[in-house]
Structure formats: C-alpha cells, structure tokens
Amino acid sequence: MSRPGFVLEVDDRTPPLVVHEGEGFRLETFPLGTRVIYPPESLPAVPDVDQAIQHALRNPEGSDPLPELLFPGMRLTVAFDDLSLPLPPMRSPDIRQRIIEAVLTMAAAAGVDDVELVAANALHRRMTAAELKHIVGERVFRSFFPQGALYNHDAEDRSNLTHVGLTDQGEDVEINRRAAESDLLVYVNVNLVAMDGGHKSVPVGLASYKSLRHHHNSKTMVRSHSFMDHTKSHLHHSAWRMGQLLKEHLNIFQIETTLNNEVFPAPYDFLMKREWEWSIKDQGSMLAARRALSLAPARLRHKMFHDLRAPYGLTGVHAGDTEQVHEKTIAAVHRQQLVEVHGQADVLVMGVPYLCPYNVSSTMNPILATCMGLGYYFNSYRGQPVVRRGGAVILYHPLKPDFNQLHHPSYVDFYEEVLAESTDPAVIEAKHEQNYAADPWYVHLYRTSHAYHGVHPFYMWYWAAHAMDHVNEVIWVGADRRAVQRLGFRAASSLADALEMASDTVGRSPSITYLHNPPHLLADVR
Amino acid sequence: MKRPRKRHDGTAGPAERPADRLADRLAGRKVLVTGATGFVGEALLHRLLTQVPGVTIAVLVRPKGTDSGVSRIRALVQKPIFAAAVEAAGGVDQLLDGRIEVVEGSLSDPPTLPTDLDAVVHCAGDVSFDPPVDQAFATNVVGVRNLLRQVAEVGPQVHYVHISTAYVAGRRKGPVPEGPVDQSVDLAAELSWGTAQRDVVEQRSRDAGRLARLRRKAEKAHGRAGMLAAAQAVEEDRRAWVNEELVRAGTERARALGWTDCYTFTKALGERVVESHAEHSPVSIIRPSIIESALQTPHPGWIEGFKMAEPLILAYGRGELPEFPAAPDTIVDIVPVDHVVAAVVAVLAEPREPGRPEWFHVSSGARRPLTFRQLYGGVRDYFDRHPFELGDRGATRLPEWHFPGVQAVERLLVTSERAHKVADYLVDHAPRADRTRDLARKLDRQRGRLEFLRRYLDLYREYAQAELTFSDTNTLALYRRLTPQDQQDFCFDAAVIDWDHYLGEVHCPAVTEPLRQYDVVRRQRRASATNAPVPLTGEAVDGVAAFFDMDGTLLSSNVIETYLWMRLQEMGPSERFAELTRIAARVPGLVRAERRDRSAFLRSIYREYAGARMADLDEIADDILTSHVLSRVSPAAVRRVREHRAAGHRTVLITGAIRPLTRALRPLFDHIEAADLAVDDRGVCTGFLEASPLVGESRAAWLRHWAAEQGIDVARSFAYADSQSDLPLLEVVGHPVAVRPDTTLFRHARKRRWPIVDWSSPTVASRSLAPAGEYG
C-alpha cells in the first residue's frame, strides 16, 4: 500500500533534504519549522495494461465502443501527445504505443485503410524520426512513417489547416486539416499532470498560432489560478470553449492515460524516497551519484540525466467523450499527486530539475528554467498558491545561459534582445510577440528543422506571469548572476543569503514551504 | 596649455649705450633663415620677431604638397608662440608684409636669393640620426653646397651662419676645441659614393636570388590570402630592405671613418664645404650639442616634435626601459633650444671677416656638466612625483637602473628578442582561440617595445658612451661681450642651468604633456568604444550588401568535419571505422595543405566525394546536415544577417564549401556563392568541381564583379570573415568585420581598427555521429 503525501515540519532530527538544481542535486539543511511537501508514494500500476486498454476502448465513457465507430472507407486520424510528455520520457514501450497498436488493430479489423498518425506538437519542435519511433513503437513506425502517414503537425502549413469557426467569445478555432476532415479523430494522451488532457488535447495540440494566441497570452495566464486546475484556469476555459465548438464539427474519441510516480529508475530511485528512510544502499547510491556528478564533464552529466527513462506504471486509462473521460482522469491524477496543505507560506522554495517539457534531449536554458520553476512548479496548487501574495520565491538552478541553437533559436534572440529590454510579460507581449511569431526565419526553422516556433519563448514567459504577478521577490540560489539579472530576478549564493535578501519582504522569521518535487505533486492549499 | 610668457620690451637699461644692444646692432639688417619650420628655425624666427624688432627676415621654404611656402609660413606664425608678434604687428598679414619675406624653393635646387641680404642662417638639416645614406648626403652636404652657391651669388659680404652639431667631432675622446674637424676624408669621393648608393642598392634589391627568398617567405606567410597579397608583401619587404641597407651603408661608412653615425659624418663633411666657402666670405659655425626644450623663451619647456631624449624619457616613464647601456658618470651634453637661438642672434650681431671663420660650441658639458646618473635621477624623480597613469591600473612601476654596462644590456636585449621570436612562432602556429589572440596582442606590444629598444639602444649607444667635452671658450667670450641686459635677454651661458629644476620642472613636464593628453583622449575613446560593428538602424537602403564567409564565421565547423558527416551516413560501422582511420591519417597533410593554399586543400577534400550520388548528397544534406549546420550556427551571426536583411541590405554567403552544405542557410541569404561538385551523366560525383573553389583573392574578385553587376556600392557594404585567407575579401568593402579571427587576421584587424566580434557557436551541440539523438 502506498502512503499518501504529507507535510513534514523540519525539526532538529531532520536530515539535509534533496533539492534538485539542473543537472544535479544538493542536500540542503532547511531552517527549523520549514514545511516540506512530499508527494504521495507511487500508486500500484494496473496489472494488465493491454487488458485495461481493451476495456477502455470497448467500454468508453459517453460514447459508443471504438469498434463500432470504425467502418470501411472511413478517414481515421490518430493524434497523440508529443515528446513533451511524459517527463522524463517513458521507458519503452511507451503507453501511447500500446494504445495506438490497439486502435490500429481494431481499425484493421473494421477494414479501415485511410489512417494517418499526427503528433500533436502544436508549436513545439518537430520530432525526429527516432523520437517518433520511440512514441509509436517500431511496428507502427515501420508501417506508417515511410509512406508519410506518420508525421508532425505543422502549424504553419496554411494549406493543411482548417478554420473551424469562432467560439461564442470570438476565439478562432483553427486546427490540422486532416484531423478536422476525418470521420473520426482518436486522440491518445498521457495525462502526466492536471494541466494536460481534456480539451487541451485537440484544440491546443493540433492548433495554429492564430488559435493559440487567444489563450496563450499574459492576460489569460495571470488569471489562471492555477493552470493546474482547469476549472479555475482562464487558459482552460478558452480551450474548453474551443473544444465544445469542435465537438459540433467532428467526432473525437479521447483516450487519456494516467501514470504513477515512478519517475526515477534504479539506481536513482533514492530520489523518490524520504531522506530519513534511506537505506544503506540508497545512501551509497546517493554518494556515488554526487561524486560522479561532481567529477563528470558537462557533456557527460547532461547524458547521465537525459538518458534516464522513467519506469512509469499505468494507473488508469479512460476513453470516450472528452469531458467525461477527463473527469475520471483528473481524479486519478489527484489520487497520485494531491497533498493537502494548510495555509500559505511567506516563502516558497523549489528546486528546478534538469528537465522541462521543452528540453527533452536538449538544453535547459534560463527561460525554460524560469518557466519550469515559476510556471509549472509554482502553479502546482489547487485552491490558493502555496506562497502568500507579496511573498518570496526561492529557486535552485544554475541558469547557465546556454542555448540549443537547433531547438531554441528564437530563445537566444528572445534572451538577447527582448529580455534585455523588458521582463514584463505584458510589455513584451505588446511590443515583440507579433514580430517573433511571424518571423519567416523562425517559421522556416520550425517547419523544416527541429526548432520551437518563434513565439514559443514568449509563452514560456507568460507561463511564469502569474507567479511574477503574485510574489514580490524571486531569488535564485547558485545561479549564473548575469543570467539572473537579465531575467530580472535576484541571485544568492546560499539559502541563508536568499532568506536574508527576502527578509525585506517577508521579515526575519518567515514561514517557509519547500515543494519536494519531482516526483510530481499538486498542493491542495486550504 | 597656457604658460606665463615673459614679455620683452627691448628697451635698454640707462647705463648702456643703445648701439651696444643686440637689437640695435641688428636693426635694419636682413637675415635669411632656412629650416624656419623646424625646431631651431621656428625658435629663431620667434626670437627675431619678438626681440629684434629692427631686423627683416627672409625665409627659404619649400612648398609641401598643395601648401605653398607662403601658406606654410602663414600657418606657422599662427601658432600660439607668435601671438604676441602678430598682435604687435596688428595681424598676420601685417606681420608677413612688414617683417617676413618668403622665398619659395628647396635646397636641392635653391632659388636666387634676395640681393639685399646681410646674413644667412642655415638651420635646415636632417635631424634623424639614421637617415638613408643618400638622403644624409643630399641634405647635409649637397644642400649646403647648393645654398652656398646662391649665397655667393648675392655677394661675398653676406655673413653665413651654419648650424652644425657638436658631435661632428666623431668618436674622439676628451676635450674638443672650437675649430675645424681634424679630418682627411676625400670629400668628393665620399660624396659621389654617397649619392650613388640609392641606385646601387636598388639594383641589388632586384637580384633574382634575393627576390626569390623574399617571395618564398611572403608566400609562406601570405599565400593563403593569395598571390597578389604575397606579391605586395614581397615589394614591401624589398623597399624596407633597400631602406635598411642604405641606413646600414651610411652607418658603416661613418664608423669606418671615425664617426658615430651617418648624421655626424655628413654634418662634418658639410662643415668642410662651409670651410671652403669661408675662404672668401664671413662665416660662423655654431655647434650645439643635444638640443632640448627651452629654458625660458618662448616659454619654459617649449618644444616642437620629438627630439633625441624624449622617446627615452617617455619609455622610461612608461616602465618600458629596463636598463640603459651607459656608464653612470658619462656626461650627457644637453642644451636648451633658447640658448642655441640666443647664440645665433649674438653671432649674427658680430662682424666677421672673410677667411677667418669662427666656431662656437653651444653646449653644457664644460660649464655645467650633467652626468647620466644625474639625468636618470632627475627623470626618475619627476616620474616619482608625476607618474604616468596609463590605462586604469594606477601609477606605472618605474624600473631601477643599475648601469650594468653595455654588454649586459645587450645580452638582456638579445635574449628577449630570441624569446619573442620563439613565442611569436608558437602563436602563429597555435590553433585559434581567445587565449591565442590575447597572447598575440601581448606579443605585438612586446615586439613594439623590443624594436623600440633595439633601435634606440643601437642609436644612442655611441652617444651614451661618448667621453667628449666640448670646449666653449669662444661661445663664452661671445656671451661676455654682450651688455648685461642682453646677457639676460639672450642668455646662452650654460652655467645658469639648474639641472634638477630643468629636468623636473621644465623638460619632463613639457615632453610628457602630449602623452598625458593623448592618454585622456584614449581613455575616453576606450570608454566609448565598443569595438562593435556599426549598428544597423534607420530605414532600408538600396545598393548595400553584406557578405558572409561560412565556415568559422557563421558556424563552427570545417570542411573535413562536414565531409565526414556526409560520407559516414552511408556507411556501416566497420566501414565508418575504416573511413575515420583513413581520414585521420591524412589530417596532418591536409592541415599543411590548408596553411599553404586553401584551394588545393579544398580540391583534395572534394576528391573524396568521387563516386557519391548527387541526389543522395542532397538528401543527406536535408535530412542530417541541416541539423548539423543549424546547431553549429552562431546565434549572434544569424542575428546580424537578419539585421542586415531588415535594413534592406542584400545578404550574400560566400563559401568554398560545396553547395549541398549551404542548403540549411538558404532562407537567410539572397545569394549563395558555393562550390559545385561536377557530376557525370548518371548523377554521380566525379570528385572534381565545376569551377575553381572561391577562396582568397578570387573571392575579392568575385565580390567586385558581382557588386558591379548588381549595382552594389562596395564602399557602403559589409563583409564578415574569420581567417587570413579572407583578407582580400575584407579589404574590398567599406565595413569589414573580423569574426573570431585567426592570429594573422587578428593582428591585421587591430592595426586597421576593424571591428572584431566574437560570434561564438553553441558549445553544447551534440557531437555524436547520430545526429537524431540516441532517443529510445
């Protein structure tokens, strides 16, 4: 039986605790009284995955069974989440592979032969063939990729986009033409966190900039409290409106999956355990890992982390009508991630790890690190933020201003040109977003190379807008000082210094809460 | 810089008879001055204009460029020291009309002189110690002879005052009397030898063997930039050699005959010419020692240009003169310029008889000797009180001299020179990096210092060791004949000099002032200079292009690397290993070839493509190389290309690489000039190129041709490149920019003040040969 998440109060018997910081981690001694939020332990996985899939497809929520939706001569499109999910990437076979194989088997049995597979990567980078193969598996890849029936969604290919209509609030709904014109669109999702899935799958993953700009902007993001709770997120409200419009025009069969918290494979599994419960073996692994990381050159360290594949277990698979499915999905996510927390803190401490959705096999640049810390982690709450309004946030990450020029070309320019001018999301949005979004060079790189769309760094910055609006002080520990300055934050060399700096805002004896993730957690702040 | 100026009203004291005053004795006379634009000439002109109101001055000036003699004199009298004279005359024109007669002409072919001349003062001369021998003879001997011929035309009564140098005594030791130099040199023979040297050396410099040696050296150093650049270097080297050889010839001949250098040697021969003129005309010969800044007039510390001791003083103050090859008790014979000029005026005022020339040593060694130790002490003391604050590192550390003797200093210098040579070779052959460039910059500065030391130590060694005392009996007697008031107004008695005061308060402040001012300017410039290329703002303009080199400038990749990327894609693991080994074995040879001639290098690499199918290459380029190239592109470079586009400029990529490799960058450029692999009718590469690869000078030629065809103004255009072989390309455009340059280009760019940018490429890019990443 797995134990639920809980809140530890640091006392004099508490050992130093793991804090992630980029490609490494440290053991930090927190001030007495610091509250540490631990996620629930990993839930047991579904014993027979294939059977669970079959059951979900044949007994869907609010929909006919999938086999009944398939008929000869139909146009079937299978869309699936791209490599930004799950994190870290899942150990082979990926759950999407098993679902897609099941769907395709049913389609073959029904005599469907017009099938295409589209990665719902929206404005994310095109995946390489190897990356596609990892998600869909060798067999599917071999049968579809060479024929051009397995490909990345291209949000800039005007001829392959369909403007479906406007929502009641005038939002453009423009998605992939093949998907829009299919008799059935099957969407295969991996619902890693509460933000994913639901109407965020089709209306966002297969959309174009024209459609995305309605909810991916600073105003919406500041008002999404939080975007990990779709009922209170303006981002999701917009996506939901779009999804409801789409539902009128096409048949969507949504398949959502939820995973447990098995994010670190052995020998790194000590990172998922509570420090005072580390066995001799765990301590040995920890010491070995720290030693190796301190000796390894940057390239090797990068490889050590980015070669990690998570041994995730499936906790649930649901199929059918998007909204009904998503309700069950969210319940499953909450079971695995929700931790009850009482009251807000003056200071929120978070360790930003080596990976975010947009640097798989790539570099975690300062903008992505900001997005991960002030975006995803800060928003990992339900109810109210973990930190009080006007409080302080302390983050750990080296923030080296290294960029992957292949994947993040517009990020470099965003960092050098836009952030050098202003760090205010609204100002940046008004002044620069259009230029970056329409820039032909970025568009070219997005379409032909493996680059994130020109506008993507803006979205990363908007992701952090709610946090920047909510707190008074953002302090990075152990970070590159020039990068921190560029981002408009402050740098400290240790937690003690950071607290010293924050004392102007929160006083000498603030209440401190440390979010002990990964593994993923969602703080239910009462 | 304003200094209190001493006013001279020219009135005689009550005890003196007016006729005794110099001003009165010279009243109504007309004196021709040569070299009025020089240091001594200018001071003399000033003296005569301000303190001898009755005298009319004729100046012999040579037109210089588009400046006529008159305009040069006009410019001269507008200098601050003449302000009082101009004011007294009521304006520049009035001064020129009333007091100065300009005679245009040069000493190589002097014009007819005014017939009403009473005296001629010949100040013009070559003041450099190491002039080419032909030039030294032309000025110091032929010039004097030509002038005297014209003086004789005016009449035998004209008093000729010749400014020579005390060092005509040569390498003698002990006291030197004020009389003719004891010499038995065959003047005619030396003169014809000296004037013929230019032709002789020019002939020798064109010797086939010598040219071949120079060419080999130049091609080794500049071959990568092309044959024309090498040829230019050969010609520059040859000219430099001619000059050095002429200097050497003069010095050696002078030393063979007992003089320190060509300057004193030809000056002595000049005196011989003057002596023969003196047989039937009144002649005075004034021999100053080392002339330095003024003690009193026009104002204390007045100095024009750099004289003999200043470079050494400045170098010492900058901490760059570690030791000096002099004995501490050697006498340095320095004399302020106003003493020399006053002596000239006094000499002018005295009657002189034909056939009885007089010599005057204007020097300090006999009356108020200054030892080297004292000089060192005075200068050091000055800099202790007023150190140079070069840059922002505080006061410069002053070296302490121990006077170890000539041999020790020479050894120190030779060792430093050798060490520098070795370091320079290493830097030249080191791979390029920030550290290499930094080293190159330091070495260049070091070389500048060493060359300076070598030149000055060679030059001054003779003087620093001279154990001469110039007797000044004649001069002193002349001085004593002046009225007491004139002795004050026209002082040239060395006994009045207080060396500590002169060095600390007069001379050192004067010679360091320009450098201090320059330093302020330089500091401001450094504060404002970013060394960044011109920002591209404003509206779009037509007719401008930006040319970019690819490998090394836009991206951190090279031809061998990209070749491997392309070929290895088609191979299995064992083939890959074999191919890698084969290429690795070839690398040293290829690197040598690259240093020698880039196009040969490229050809030999492209031969490796023989047998590859063009279609496959294109496909590989699109599938794999695009990522390889794009992940190596420097973000700053791409930003710059895009800025150019935004500014309406045409963007052009010039590369010696084959066209498939440029596919990834196509959208950034309006035109891509790349090498095309030749294919046979089956579409298989032959291993040859369609045309010669575009490297070195051919790039410059192509650029000119293309620009003319497209209506591009190269003077307003930009070029970006990283290596020496791109020099011709960069030279063509108006805005060249060196990007992470190799050492040679780095040095060149610094010299030419081209912007140098550091467009570094991402370091984290994956280097594995599976560019798709080992995902899954």
Image: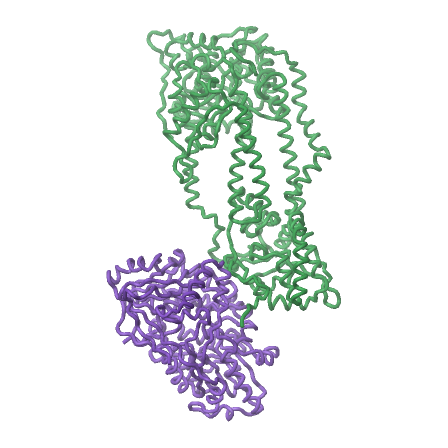
Chain colours: A purple, B green
The image quadrant that residue A136 belongs to is bottom right
Q: Nearer the viewer, residue A454 or A377?
A: A377
Seen in the image, is A221 located left or right of residue B312? left
List x then y, in percent, for residue A505. 26, 61
The image quadrant that residue A419 belongs to is bottom left
Is residue A514 visible to us here? yes
List x then y, in percent, for residue A226. 34, 74
Seen in the image, is B719 located left or right of residue B684? left
Q: Is residue B398 above or below residue A350?
A: above
Seen in the image, is A453 located left or right of residue A329? right
Q: Nearer the viewer, residue A504 or A14?
A: A14
Q: Nearer the viewer, residue B770 or B469?
A: B770
Q: Is residue A408 above or below residue A242?
A: above
Residue furthest to the front: A280
Q: Is residue A179 above or below residue B100?
A: below
Is residue A237 visible to us here? no
Q: Is residue A497 above or below residue B345?
A: below
Q: Nearer the viewer, residue A367 or A237?
A: A367
List x then y, in percent, for residue B296. 39, 20
Question: For the image shown, how many numbered marks are present on the structure?
Answer: 0
Residue furthest to the right: B681
List x then y, in percent, for residue A284. 43, 65
- Quadrant holding the N terminus of chain B: top left
